[in-house]
Image (spheres, rainbow, N blue to C red):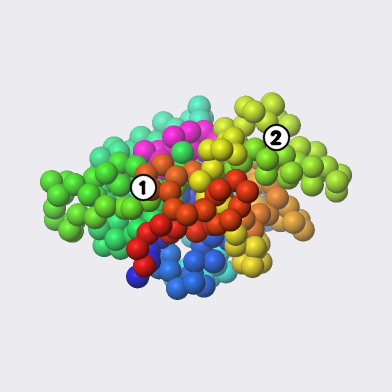
């Protein structure tokens, strides 16, 4: 059975980066599992009547985001969701340089070997052929995204090592590891599309597009997963996070006001494993994360 494991930092990251991909593979009979590292306790709250849930008030946002994630998974058809080390084991670290980074329970302060062991247990149980996570910058530099990258990549290596915690199960080598990414040409088209409906560039506060961390040259992309048939599922999953995301037509905005287009095709960099046959795109990109794998 084909198996796909995604490792993300907070509830909503999976819908933003991979929602359409997840829905497509569920529909195709792939075992899709999401492993989330924190409850997202430090997120800003977009819904005024729920503002009291915030970390500086009742500090109950993490519990609320569990329910949001549950609804998002239902929208995508995903039935296997897990928390790294159990729900609440690691706390949202907040943005880089904030007091939340100093919390001893913050994921940013977690021991990578210990956290990776929790992920190894999942990898060895599920034996996924494909794993998806962030790049070394965590996409846009969030401490938890960077830490999720470190934990995921350590877990990939450790899961294949018979000497690493043998009590966690038989060793397993993940065949392909992808990092979420956005090709420059697609981001430019998105900016143009937003301009056509009177919206400004979503990256105005970040400087030139070349400086946006998760935007990569087109030639760095290995796979473009066409899941436009499941864009509605992704849209529903995004709407399941009202405390964090505002969806308006074909666009959505995060609590930091960064607007993005709801994409039905999602893009990936291949960092471990062999590149499979292309899907016929002019760029030579794969159209399937399992391309080139047996079965």
Where the N terminus falls, by quadrant?
bottom left
Where disc 2 sits, the SS reads loop
Magenta extent: 136-151
Relative vertical location of residue 31 with respect to residue 152 in this rendering, above or below? below
Q: Is residue 185 magenta?
A: no
Q: Residue at x 75, y 41 (%)?
A: 191
Where disc 1 sits, the SS reads loop
- Camera-side mark, 2 or 1: 1
Where the C terminus falls, by quadrant?
bottom left
Q: Quadrant of residue 280?
A: bottom right
Q: Residue at x 79, y 42 (%)?
A: 192
- Report crowding for label 2: few under 14, some 14 to 19, many 20 or more residues within 10 A (C-alpha): some
Q: Which residue is mark 2?
A: 203
Q: Is residue 175 left or right of residue 40?
A: left
Q: In terms of depth relative to the viewer, which is nearer, 81 or 217?
A: 217
Q: Quadrant of residue 171?
A: bottom left
Query: Of the numbered discs in the image, which one, if any, rests on residue 273?
Result: 1
Q: Position of residue 52 (x, y in %)?
A: 60, 50
Q: Is residue 5 left or right of residue 96?
A: left
Q: In terms of depth relative to the viewer, which is nearer, 134 or 107?
A: 134
Q: In terms of depth relative to the viewer, which is nearer, 291 or 189?
A: 291
Q: Quadrant of residue 203?
A: top right
Mark 2 → mark 1, Cα distance in angstroms: 33 Å
Q: Earlier in the sequence, mark 2 or mark 1?
A: 2
Relative vertical location of residue 205 with respect to residue 14 in this rendering, above or below? above
């Amino acid at each position: 059975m084909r198996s796909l494991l995604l490792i993300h930092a907070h509830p909503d990251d999976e819908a933003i980066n991979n929602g359409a991909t997840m829905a497509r593979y569920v529909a195709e009979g792939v075992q899709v599992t999401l492993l989330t590292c924190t409850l997202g306790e430090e997120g800003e709250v977009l819904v005024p009547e729920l503002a009291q849930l915030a970390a500086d008030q009742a500090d109950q946002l993490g519990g609320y985001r569990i329910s949001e994630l549950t609804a998002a998974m239902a929208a995508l058809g995903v039935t296997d969701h897990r928390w790294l080390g159990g729900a609440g084991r690691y706390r949202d670290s907040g943005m880089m340089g904030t007091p939340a980074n100093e919390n001893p329970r913050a994921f940013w302060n977690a021991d990578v070997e210990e956290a990776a062991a929790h992920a190894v247990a999942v990898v060895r149980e599920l034996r996924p052929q494909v794993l998806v996570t962030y790049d070394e910058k965590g996409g846009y530099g969030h401490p938890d995204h960077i830490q999720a990258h470190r934990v995921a990549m350590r877990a990939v290596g450790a899961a294949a090592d018979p000497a690493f915690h043998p009590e966690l199960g038989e060793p397993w080598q993940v065949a392909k590891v992808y990092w979420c990414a956005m090709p420059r040409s697609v981001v430019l088209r998105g900016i143009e599309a937003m301009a056509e409906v009177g919206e400004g560039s979503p990256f105005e506060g970040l400087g030139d597009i070349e400086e946006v961390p998760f935007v990569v040259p087109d030639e760095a992309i290995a796979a473009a997963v066409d899941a436009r048939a499941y864009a509605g599922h992704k849209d529903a999953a995004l709407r399941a996070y009202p405390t964090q995301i505002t969806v308006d037509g074909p666009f959505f905005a995060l609590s930091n006001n960064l607007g993005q287009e709801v994409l039905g095709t999602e893009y990936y960099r291949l960092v471990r494993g062999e590149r499979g046959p292309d899907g016929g795109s002019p760029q030579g990109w794969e159209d399937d994360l399992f391309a080139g794998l047996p079965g």
